[in-house]
Amino acid sequence: MQSGLDDAEMMRRAIALAVRSGQEGEYPYGVVICQGGNVIAESINRVAHERDVTRHAEVVAISEAQIKLDSVSLDDCTIYVSAEPCAYCCYAIRESRIGRVVYGLTSPHMGGVSKWPVLTDRDISDAMPEVFAEPPEILAGFMAKEAGDALLKASPVIGRAMKARGLLVAPQAHVEATRALTVRERIMRVLRGAVFDRFGRS
């Protein structure tokens, strides 16, 4: 687990990327992926740049991290996102097995935690433990005020519209979901990397 200081530093970096994303004509989302306190990958949204609706910041960063680490599995990584990832991005987070997710603003209409519980769903990991790890540790609403202020500064019109429609909101306080891995989960983690990933996932 990252320390609180590391979390704040990495979230500030993700928020700065979100500001840059807005300035470059994208929706203002920023992502940083870390492993052991080291930045592995980071991205802004690339949808407008690449004219491809699948190029969300989270997916771009996950792809970059997998290439950099030469692995589809990002178990030991933390992803920092300026706002709650959508269901599409949360599925990518689950399939890449990122172990910890930290995000600022909540997305009650699009989020993969608060709207569709993709990040917290246990069915996919219970049904296919050789592919999907247990739900990640989640720290929600972290530095949400800073993320909201940055959104309004970077894209005042988009930021105000999103706020008025309740698309991105700052919760009252951040919520942390932590738990220790069970023995079964530890065994499955080893088996996924050593055995199952060799069949089409490495």
Image (cartoon, rainbow, N blue to C red):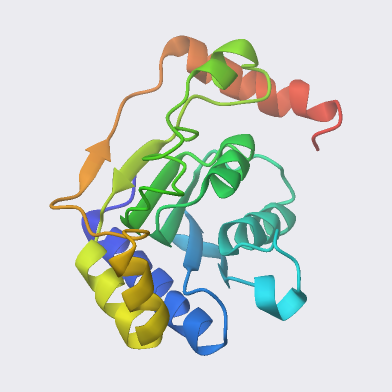
Q: Quadrant of residue 56?
A: bottom right
Is 108 located above or below residue 15 in the figure? Answer: above
Q: Nearer the viewer, residue 101 or 149?
A: 149
Is 71 located above or below residue 4 in the figure? Answer: above
The image position of residue 149, as x and y in percent, is 25, 77
Q: Quadrant of residue 19?
A: bottom left
> Which residue is at 75% across, 67% downward?
52
> Which residue is at 37% across, 59% downward?
167
Q: Quadrant of residue 96?
A: top right
Q: Residue furthest left?
A: 172
Is 175 located above or below residue 85 in the figure? Answer: above
Count the numbered circles shown: 0
Q: Nearer the viewer, residue 163 or 121?
A: 163
> Which residue is at 47% across, 77% downward?
17
Q: Quadrant of the C terminus?
A: top right
Q: Nearer the viewer, residue 19 or 62?
A: 19
> Which residue is at 47% across, 52% downward?
85
The image position of residue 70, as x and y in percent, is 74, 50
The image position of residue 22, as x and y in percent, is 48, 82
Q: Quadrant of the N terminus?
A: top left
Is 48 located above or below residue 197 in the figure? Answer: below
Q: Residue furthest right?
A: 200
